[in-house]
Image (cartoon, rainbow, N blue to C red):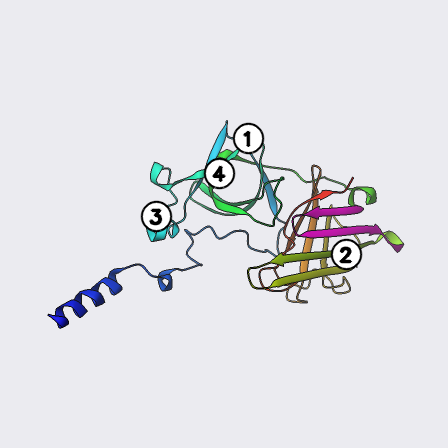
Amino acid sequence: MRAAVIGLLLSAIVSAPTAQAYDANDPANCNGIDWDDQRALVVSKVTAQPRAHLIKSPYDDDFKAASCPAATDACRKKSFLVTGDLVLVGKTRGEFTCVLYQSPAAKKPTWSKGWLPSAALTPVTPMASPQISDWTGKWSQPGGTIAIKRGDGGKLHVEGEMIVRGAQNVQTGEIGAKVTPQGGVIAFVDDGTTSFEKKDAGECRVRMQRIGPWLVVEDNSGCGGVAVTFTGFYRRAK
């Protein structure tokens, strides 16, 4: 009898989905936005009317969404975005695009992620030729601030700080560089003395764009402690 019970337990353990089965690199999994040395981050606007529900990845619902992403009720999340919301755009899979969204009213650096139908999104064109005054000022998002000041010789002086508060500790990150905007983009490695074109150089790689009223920032997650990133939408202080 005891052997039979043990056998049943072992069978249940083997057949049950476990954390070890999770594969973050599964192409069907929307994990967020990956850094790309070759191109700047793309921002899109939700143009679906009146809303677009986020779509699940296979490992959602305790590993019960294996058929997702798909255009089915079973794959549709309760959470949704509305017309006009801006998202950071990642990879595509079939008719879906992986997106990150943060509410402009958020008080903490938290993001929603998931697939959206690509047809529900329209890319937003960055400011074509930002002037120095378009960059300068104090910019902020939940947990982080970036100050951009006019420097010498057409350069800008960028300083930023990010704080991520966890349950057990606090992780921080800092950026500081002197850089010349090029092609409507601020891009720098570490303190700005290393050429951004050197793909494998430096630890902290950062790009900034002006899109609408926002300063849109992305980094390679190498600018601070664990889980620290400056990536996101920043508002200019009034």
**Amino acid identity at mark 1:** Thr
Q: CA distance from mark 3 to mark 2?
A: 43 Å
Q: Disc 1 marks which residue? A: 83
Task: Give residue 213's quadrant in the image.
Answer: top right
Q: What label does residue 65 carry, if any?
A: 3
**Amino acid identity at mark 2:** Glu
Q: CA distance from mark 2 to mark 1?
A: 34 Å
Instruction: Name the residue at 34% across, 53% down.
Output: 63
Question: Circle 1 sits in a helix, a strand or a loop, which is it?
Answer: loop
Which residues are the magenta region? 136-152
Q: Disc 2 marks which residue? A: 159
Q: Is residue 25 magenta?
A: no
| Label 3: how many Cα within 10 Å (few below 14, some 14–19, many 20+) | some
Give 114 or 165, whichever is nearer the viewer.
165
| Label 4: how many Cα within 10 Å (few below 14, some 14–19, many 20+) | some
Dominant secondary structure (helix, strand or loop) of the stretch shown in magenta: strand
**Marks 1 and 4 in Cβ contact (< 8 Å):** no
